[in-house]
Amino acid sequence: MMGASDAFWRFQALLPITFWQAFTWLGDSGLLIPAALLIALALAVAPRTRPTAWLWCTVFGAGSVVILASKLAFMGWGMGSRAFDFTGFSGHTAISASVWPVALWLLASRWGHRARVAVAIFGWLLAAGIGISRLAVDAHSVSEVVAGYLLGLTVSAVFLALAHRRAHPDLRWPLVVVGLLTPLIFFPPGRPAPTQDLLEDIAVWMAGTERPYTREDMHRR
């Protein structure tokens, strides 16, 4: 009987690598970090939702710090797990699971509660697809994608659970769409943000090493 992991890899192989390379861009920091900032600005416009904006900044900021810390710890000092092939949280997956559910919830701000829940769930499913794309393009291990997804899920779930008890934003969905698409001006589809190179430079500077630690170094060790 075919196991769940075998079924997953067969599903992943059904789609061409070019599809996954295009799809994975939906989790790029060049798109989602500006989107996270726009979410904060949209919530901060009205005084009644300004506390929700601060809540978003706090929760998303905490998740981002965890992602950065895990990446810098590995690239600078080799702090990872050889047994689990873990070099840090998958940033694409974690930020996707953090931002997309909240962005879609904001898009449905004028709709009913069930609609907002439905679009948030779709955001989590979209993030799961982006996590699969990271495996398909061989950018991360399974442990890194799963850990990233759980981290991002926690960020968005905590925010939405707390925001549900607060005043809801009243935004027109076309304005939200335009705002979320604004980053495309600077980072068109297919053009990744230089986040990885920047983190490598920071890790080398902090650790005082000649080059960043790599997955190959971990397995050789």
Image (cartoon, grey):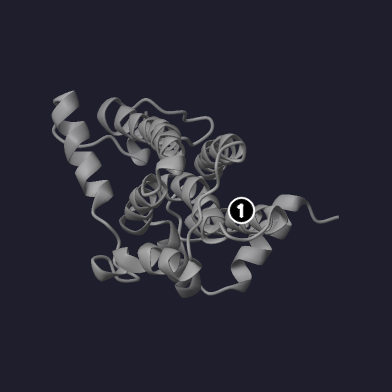
Q: Quick one: 109 or 82, which is closer to the camera? A: 109
SS class, disc 1: helix
Picture residue at 42% right of the left edge, 28% below the top: 80
Mark 1 surroundings: few (<14), some (14-19) or many (≥20) residues within 10 A: many
Give the number of callouts: 1
In the shown orientation, is residue 40 left or right of residue 10? left
- Expressed as whole percent of the image width and height from the top left, the position of residue 212 reads 23, 36
- Quarter placement of the N terminus: bottom right
Residue nearest the viewer, comparing 179 with 216 = 179
In depth, the one of 2 and 99 nearer the eye is 99
Residue most extreme to the right: 1
The percent position of residue 120, horizontal first and vertical second, equals 61, 53
Quarter location, residue 72: top left
For the point 41% across and 45% down, the residue is 91
Location of residue 173 with respect to 56 vertically, above or below: below
Residue at 68% across / 59% down in the picture?
115
| Badge 1 amino acid | Ala
Image quadrant in which the C terminus is located: top left
In the displayed structure image, the side of residue 184 where residue 105 appears, left or right: right
Q: Is residue 128 above or below residue 81?
A: below
Tell me if residue 209 can be seen: no
Residue 202, image x and y in percent?
18, 35
Asked which quadrant contains residue 35, the reply is bottom left
- Residue 69 percent coordinates (x, y): 34, 29
Confirm whether residue 213 shows in the render: yes
Q: Which residue is mark 1?
A: 120
Q: Quadrant of residue 193?
A: bottom left
**Residue furthest toward the front?**
47
**As rendered, which of 25 and 139 lies closer to the eye?**
25
